[in-house]
Image (cartoon, rainbow, N blue to C red):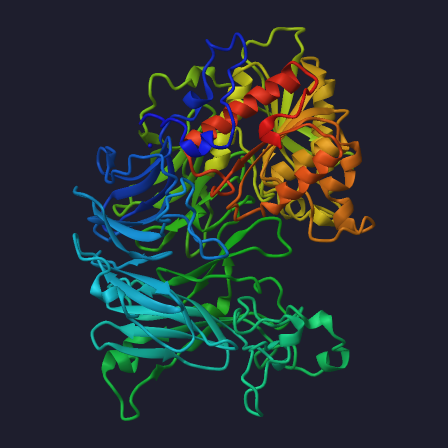
Amino acid sequence: MSTIRRLTPTLLALGVAVLAAPAGAQSKPTIAQFLSPSSPLELTRAKDADRVAWVAYERGMRNVYTAAAPEFRATRLTSFLQDDGIEVSDVELSDDGSTAIFIRGTAPNREGWVANPLHDPRGQERTVWAVRTAGGPAWRVAAANAATLAPDGKSVLYVKDGQIFRARILPNAPAPASDTLLPFIKEWGRQSNPRWSPDGSKIAWMSDRENHALIGVYDMRTRRVDFLAPSVDCDAGPAWSADSKHIVFMRRPGVPFGMQAQQGSGGIGNPPGPATARGGRGAVGGCNPFGFGRGGGRGEAREDTTRFRRMPGLYRAAFKGGYNLSVMVADVSRCPAATGPTEAGGTECSARELWHDAPNDEKFAGMRAVIWAGDHIIFPLSPPDDEWDRYYSISVANPAAGPVMLTTTNGLIEDATSAALSRDGRTLYYCTNADDIEKRHIWSVPTSGGTPKQVSTDDGIETSPEPLASGKQLAVLYFGPAQPASVGIVPASGGATRVVYPTLAADFPKSAHVTPQIVVIRSPDSLEIHNQLFLPRDLKPGERRPALIFVHGGPVRQMLPGYHYMQFYHWAYAYNQWLASQGYVVMSVNYRSGIGYGRKFRFAENTNARGNSEYQDVLAAGKYLQTRADVDPSRIGIWGLSYGGLLTSQALARNSDIFVAGADLAGVHLYGNSLDTTATSYKSSAISAIDSWKSPVFLVQGDDDRNVAFAQTVGLVQLLRAHNVYYELMVIPDDTHESLIHARWIEIFGRMGDFLHRFVWDHGAPGAQTTSGK
């Protein structure tokens, strides 16, 4: 993703100098070299052709690429050749692979502001673009936060102000195109999740009506709308069958009186909902996606409702029979909009219940989506009594048999990009760490049930499976200890990954990489903590080196012994390799409340503001390093971003005796908003130990951070000043949680490296406070 731009005037205005590399390091690889490869960020494929497309990040330039069978030679489709901080995402291909769409611009923040990290006085926007895979320039289609491409590639759907818009994909069309000025489908309520039928003849969507929700269907030929079996309940998640004749969706009970929070307009017939005063759901929240069954909902505990909770249906809702979830199927080919108007006008069509959960069920209560897969309905699930996430299947022909577990492998299945269906819907491909807990590989299983098998057999890391139309192979994202993010092709029958993109440049320091060792330590409460240890290549027997701990953010993350599939952690892994190349021993800690090691580990007791028990894992890692014969116990530092910044600040505040310096990037320093020194949340926060904070800290944050409020850094700096703690500060106006400018990352990592060299490697004493830290 070309040469790195000079530092912008914005950076120079920060009053920050780019500091020189440590003496003697000139012959060693630079951080810019480690961060130089083009990195594919996401991957998609065409339905009817063996063609894939991806977004690549190339030293700040973000572009769309494509490749097709048999050679899969990469072709760049777009020409965004500036390190301008404008993100490119959500690439999608038409069924025949001839057209690609993508989104350009960051998602808006809470104020509706699109990030503008280079301070363009015109501001920035978030827009959908299109490009032909055969070649030619890309063009802007419409302003939209997200879009869904028609199967034929001729138009897109998007939601704005709660209504559904359509924009035709017309090269060189006037902007805005005439069909983007008014909603394409305008209905009462808040419309969301529009989905084209596979043949492009219809559109299904969810229509939220505050205390109930409907599934709507628009017929492109007759231009009529039907609602599927309209009721007082909450319908969601429509999914089409392959023949475009049926829709499956989820139904949960409507909102009971005790949980209604509509604002109302006064009068007998339209009062405010009873839950309004308790902060309940309603006009801005609508139907609860998990229903209002066992456990009630937000606001219930805020008033004494004991005697009312005994009245069925007042605070908790259930269907007749006591169950709370129904999987419904509608034959839309028989709806009035498709067959023509009836005498009554034809505004609805019926649906049948395919399956429902048991009364008081907890196992399936968390169902979030349904997917039509051949002659089965499949769905992901996080069962509360299971250590691992699963996929289940319901037979359309024999639903009475109930859900069948497909992914019987015991391992993490992280999110929607971790699984995909074959073209015929009969095989589920999924990414998991089953049988290799530190990595990720691709597995497959029939959607009718059967024994899963491992498909990708590399010793690397494979994610994001995309089975191709021919059924012979699938595309994946591939990573290794010295192989940055890559697009690879894997035989569907199983085998090794063939990397097709990128070609690494000659100056990429592949030989400078080390293969991280897996080190398992025990915390004081005996919990096993898995870590990656990076040992410098030039480490000599008997030599003691300075060491650094890296703590990931999230905390719902897992660092791996190879390049990571998330962009910042891809960079963090590269930076840890760079630190090892500079001579540091580096340890990356997978502390409790992270993922990859099961549900009990993820939801460990007393984490976060409830006691911060995860910090003991970081402290145990520091003490472990002190016992190593190759580590100088007096020279140990720490760094991390976000939740990793939180743990860094805690380490420096609580244990300056172990951690002599640290880099806190966009960290959280106060849990919640209580300043009561006896409150558990306050005692769990870094600032509760400010009196014992002695070690220097390097602070970085953008003030358009959408993940961690910039107020966290503002407040911490006031305390550091008051307690005479040395800090160096880098404030980046208009930038986000993870900087959007590549040149900025080179500067951040360079300055951080200099800071760590002075205060960890040299174990120097802080001098006068730097100008940039005031």
Task: Give the quadrant of residue 153.
Answer: bottom left
Residue 176 located left or right of residue 634: left
- Closest to the observer, 517 or 679: 679
In the depicted structure, whether residue 443 falls above or below residue 270: above
The spot of residue 467 in percent (x, y) is 33, 45
Residue 609 located left or right of residue 581: right
Could you tell me which residue is drawn at 52 percent across and 30 percent down?
572
Task: Give the quadrant of residue 118.
Answer: top left
- Closest to the observer, 758 or 509: 758
Q: Quadrant of the C terminus?
A: top right
Could you tell me which residue is drawn at 50 percent across and 50 percent down?
407
In the rendered picture of this protein, how many numbered marks are placed on residues? 0
The spot of residue 516 in percent (x, y) is 55, 23
Q: Is residue 131 something one can see in this rendering?
A: yes
In the depicted structure, whether residue 299 falls above or below residue 406: below
Q: Residue furthest right?
A: 678
In the depicted structure, whether residue 206 falls above or below residue 486: below
The spot of residue 284 in percent (x, y) is 52, 70
Q: Is residue 459 something one can see in this rendering?
A: no
Q: Quadrant of the N terminus?
A: top left
Could you tell me which residue is drawn at 68 percent across and 16 percent down?
763
Could you tell me which residue is drawn at 67 percent across and 47 percent down?
600
- Closest to the observer, 731 or 316: 731
- Closest to the observer, 267 or 508: 267
The spot of residue 345 in percent (x, y) is 29, 89
